[in-house]
Image: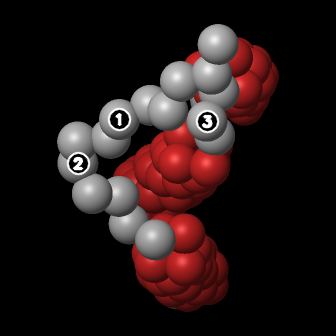
Amino acid sequence: MTKKIPLEIPLETEEAQRRKIVSRLARIEGQIRAIQGMILDNCSCEQVALQLTAARRALDKAFYEMIICSLNNHIESSDDIEDVRAATKELARLLAKFG
């Protein structure tokens, strides 16, 4: 039996989600450039480590945004709960492997 999954909250369009992730990556790119500058300017290792940690966390957030985007797209495009379960299982595998 196929059953359409009701969504109660409006989701961003896929294009809006992509733009959001690309924008986040552009900010991370700026962070990385700033870190390179800090290293060239002989900033302390602790200051560089702090900025590296911030950049790493920002990349983690981009990764999770991408996973959420993928899950939302599977939910919206599927009429079959089993398809959603399979997609969720695959995304859980990705989270376990890379998250």
Chain-order first, disc 1 or disc 3: 1
State the image quarter where residue 97 is shown: top right
Name the residue type under label 2.
Ile
User: From this viewpoint, is residue 44 visible?
Assistant: no
Q: Is 45 located above or below residue 83 in the figure? A: below
Q: Quadrant of the N terminus?
A: top right
Residue denoted by label 3:
79
Circles 2 and 3, Cβ within 8 Å, touching? The answer is no
Judge by depth and name the residue closer to the eye, 41 or 24. Answer: 24
Q: Is 41 located above or below residue 24 in the figure? A: below
- Residue at 46 percent across and 71 percent down: it is 13
Residue denoted by label 1:
6
Disc 3 secondary structure class: loop
Calculate the distance from the C-alpha at mark 1 to the C-alpha at mark 3. 10 Å
Residue denoted by label 2:
9
- Residue at 27 percent across and 57 percent down: it is 10
Circles 1 and 3, Cβ within 8 Å, touching? The answer is no
- Residue at 49 percent across and 32 percent down: it is 4
Q: Is 30 located above or below residue 82 in the figure? A: below
Chain-order first, disc 2 or disc 3: 2
State the image quarter where residue 82 is shown: top right
Calculate the distance from the C-alpha at mark 1 to the C-alpha at mark 2. 9 Å
Report crowding for label 1: few under 14, some 14 to 19, many 20 or more residues within 10 A (C-alpha). few
Calculate the distance from the C-alpha at mark 2 to the C-alpha at mark 3. 17 Å
Q: Position of residue 56 (x, y in %)?
A: 53, 51
Name the residue type under label 3.
Asp
Q: Position of residue 95 (x, y in %)?
A: 65, 26
Foreground: disc 1 or disc 2:
1
User: From this viewpoint, is residue 12 visible?
Assistant: yes
Q: Position of residue 58 (x, y in %)?
A: 45, 57
Report crowding for label 2: few under 14, some 14 to 19, many 20 or more residues within 10 A (C-alpha). few
Q: Is 85 located above or below residue 40 in the figure? A: above
